[in-house]
Image: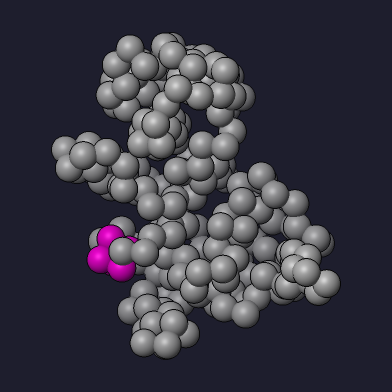
Amino acid sequence: MIRFENLTKSFRVARSRRVVIDDLNLTLPTGRSLALLGRNGAGKSTLMQIIAGNMRADRGRVVSDGTISWPVGFAGSFHPELTGAQNTRFIARVYGVDTGELADFVRDFAELGSHFFMPVRTYSSGMRSRLTFGLSMGIEFDTYLVDEVTSAGDVAFRTKSKRLFATRMERSGAIMVNHNLGELREYCDAALVLEGGRLTYFDDLEEAITLHKANMGH
């Protein structure tokens, strides 16, 4: 369960303040895979960062009775001077999982070869994406926050990523941002639409997609 209580977030733009999340009160159901829909700039990434605890709201709070991942695809928490292996061991200690087991999983899954033992600052964006995806999937969370989960790597790696993600979704929920509506239909069974600072829950994914397309002017 994730519950938003009077959640509000705004940013200063020029001489005014733009509200992207406006006094949000909503409880999300447990174990559902939710598509998060909204136009560019609506505040989807902001909401994901607040849920993950990486960004503070202006007021209000997020309450959860389960574990929540960091946004999959977000590598900002990596220390650039540490190697992939060192970052992995650090994150394992933070989340209380076995360091050796997680390191073995990530090294095998991410297919970084010797780069796994090199500083993250030397990685390409694709290598960072594979590292953060492997780390996220190597730890079992109750809810995964996902941004373009299967976009990194070649066809074979994307196929492997989709297969692993589908396995995780058998036991966990997710909030997923993806511009590919086909993938959202593949993984999600309900949706959230963020528009004008308001977040609306839809039990029917297609109904949410229809509204999202109307908001986009289609």
Between residue 117 and residue 137, name the one nearer to us.
117
* Percent coordinates x, y for residue 61 in the rendering: 75, 57
Q: Is residue 19 left or right of residue 177?
A: right
Q: Is residue 192 magenta?
A: no
Between residue 70 and residue 62, name the one nearer to us.
70
Image quadrant in which you'd find residue 189: bottom left
Q: Residue at x 57, y 78 (%)?
A: 195
Instruction: Kindly tell me whether residue 66 is visible in this rendering.
Output: yes
* Percent coordinates x, y for residue 110 in the rendering: 32, 27
Q: Is residue 202 above or below residue 52?
A: below
Q: Residue at x 44, y 82 (%)?
A: 216
Q: Main secondary structure of the magenta part?
A: helix
Instruction: Kindly tell me whether residue 134 is visible in this rendering.
Output: no
Image quadrant in which you'd find residue 204: bottom left
The boundaries of the magenta stretch are 181-185
Q: Is residue 40 left or right of residue 167?
A: right
Q: Residue at x 67, y 70 (%)?
A: 20
Q: Is residue 116 above or below residue 181?
A: above
Q: Residue at x 51, y 46 (%)?
A: 71
* Percent coordinates x, y for residue 46 in the rendering: 62, 58
